Image (tube, rainbow, N blue to C red):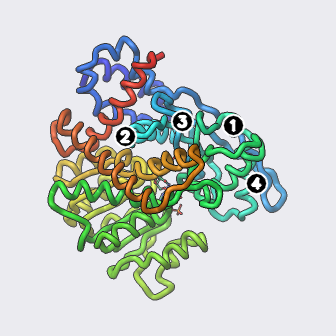
Amino acid sequence: MNPYVQKVLTDLEKRCQHEPEFIQAARLILTSVSPVIDKHPEYEKAALLESLMEPERIISFRVPWIDDQGKTQINRAWRVQYNSAIGPYKGGIRFHPSVTMGTLKFLALEQTLKNALTGLPLGGGKGGSDFNPHGKSDAEVMRFCQSLMNELYRYLGEDTDVPAGDIGVGAREVGYMFGQYKRLKNKFVGVFTGKGLSFGGSNMRPEATGFGLSYLTQAMLKTINQSFNDKRVVISGSGNVAIYAAQKVAELGATVVAMSDSDGYVVDEEGIKLDWLKDLKFSQRARISRYPEMGYGQYFEGCQNIWTVPCDIALPCATQNELSLVGAKALVQNGVIAVSEGANMPTTPDAITYLQQNGVLFAPGKAANAGGVSVSGLEMSQNSLRLSWSREEIDIRLHDIMQNIFKSVQHAAQTYAADPKDYETGANIAGFVKVAEAMMAQGAV
Ligand code: NDP
Ligand code: 2IT
């Protein structure tokens, strides 16, 4: 490894030792970009890597809210405004009890390179809270979102920082947060993406991550003359990303045989019935354990074992580090040909290595799940223009963006990686090069 890269990594491992996910993401990126740094000795003088590994700004705040029993509750929240070299900070907001500042730093770093890959003018950011939306009433979620925005609004803006959804934050939460921003600022602007269609949302934003994941995976499969047609697909999660990925791959001829939530998974050999799953998950906000109620499939407790279900293609679409070496070994044993990440960093580093060493095509999240933020970028453009593009127009643009991402990832892999199919390295390099050039041009201080 390049000695400058090694030094930055060693320092970071010491300084951020309480942020293991951030170290994990940073290590993968720094290792990948080492051959680029070899060619650019000027980066060390400009302390470019030290800059890139430190967020520009982090806002940390408390969120007081009153539950349905009248008791005050306090949660913690953050917004990591990671990097604005290419455009305003852009990235989702996550509500999950596991959220820490370190989690959001890793997500914001990933987002910075992902957004660069889209080719759109988007910087990187991420926000979130340790609030657990499960089991909360609509009114509780609304009061929480409004309270969070009472603090966060002062740091946002359509040209400054534009959040969106992520785990635990969908159209309902975005609507409440956007509404509160508008009240506080007395301005109707595109300060959030993923809004409802009736108030400035984009067509296809709900579908964009899952559809984009399918398009990128399709492009990757094409390199080995394969497609989704007649393939068995396993998808972890049953949220926004997982469900629309399932919809698109089924349209492309695959059978989705298993899906999950954090409690367990269902197997339906005839193909998951998506209308029923959408009803359960989106309308009833119910657990996937209820899927067999209509007489289809079988439920198994424990989400980790989903990777033992035989499949040709696996799409981890739930959360970070959900696909470990044990899961990767089970997938390889059952003959998987491709793993494509719908979630952010769902595959552990040893699992990635194992998959790649066993000839499995692997598409990293920062490329594969970039469709969501891409259509967010298109939503920002439509808001600025005060017009709305059709579903067909957005779908064509999304498809093009995913093709272009795959091409640039492939090109970087062929240029720099030991294995031209090492898309993990390719995506890190292609994203990094764009951010690095923009930072240097603006004076990396
Ligand atoms: P949702 O909240 O809609 O769905 C998340 C799904 O993952 C649920 O099925 C949830 O199960 C499961 N899950 C969440 N946390 C865990 C956990 N700790 N262990 C096991 N399962 C878990 O989120 P999204 O679909 O939006 O996000 C999924 C992933 O995709 C995340 O990594 C996110 O960062 C990433 N992503 C999202 C984009 C978007 O546009 N929404 C864009 C790009 C990436 P349960 O209901 O039981 O919690
Ligand atoms: O991880 C992600 O890319 C997202 N959660 C979507 C971000 C966005 O701004 O649309």
Mark 2 within 8 Å of ligand 2, using the beta carbon? no
Report helix, strand or loop for mark 1. Answer: strand
Q: Residues within 10 Å of mark 2 (few under 14, many from 20)?
A: many
Specify the label residue 143 is tagged with: 4
Give residue 270's position: percent from left, percent from top.
Answer: 33, 82
On the image, the x and y values in percent for residue 225 come to 15, 60
For mark 3, does the 10 Å Cα neighbourhood hold few (<14), some (14 to 19), or many (20 or more) residues? many
Q: Residue at 43% x, 40% y: name it.
A: 120
Residue type at mark 2? Leu
Q: Nearer the viewer, residue 340 or 381?
A: 381
Q: Amino acid at mark 1?
A: Phe
In screen coordinates, is 373 left or right of 191?
left
Res. 271 image quadrant:
bottom left
Looking at the rendered structure, the secondary structure element under dot 3 is strand
Would you say residue 138 is visible in this rendering?
yes
Q: Where residue 439 sits: x, y (%)?
A: 42, 23
Q: Which residue is mark 2?
A: 117
**Mark 1 vs 3: CB contact within 8 A:** no
Tell me which numbered mark, 4 or 2, is placed earlier along the sequence.
2
Question: Toward which corner of the image does residue 408 lie, by quadrant?
Answer: top left
Label 4 vs label 3: CA separation?
A: 25 Å
Cα distance between the residues tagged 2 and 3: 15 Å
**Helix, strand or loop at disc 4?**
helix
Give the camera-side residue of 360 and 220.
220
Front one among 59 and 248:
248
From the image, tell me which residue sits under label 3: 89
Q: How many marks?
A: 4
Of mark 2 and mark 3, the one earlier in the sequence is 3
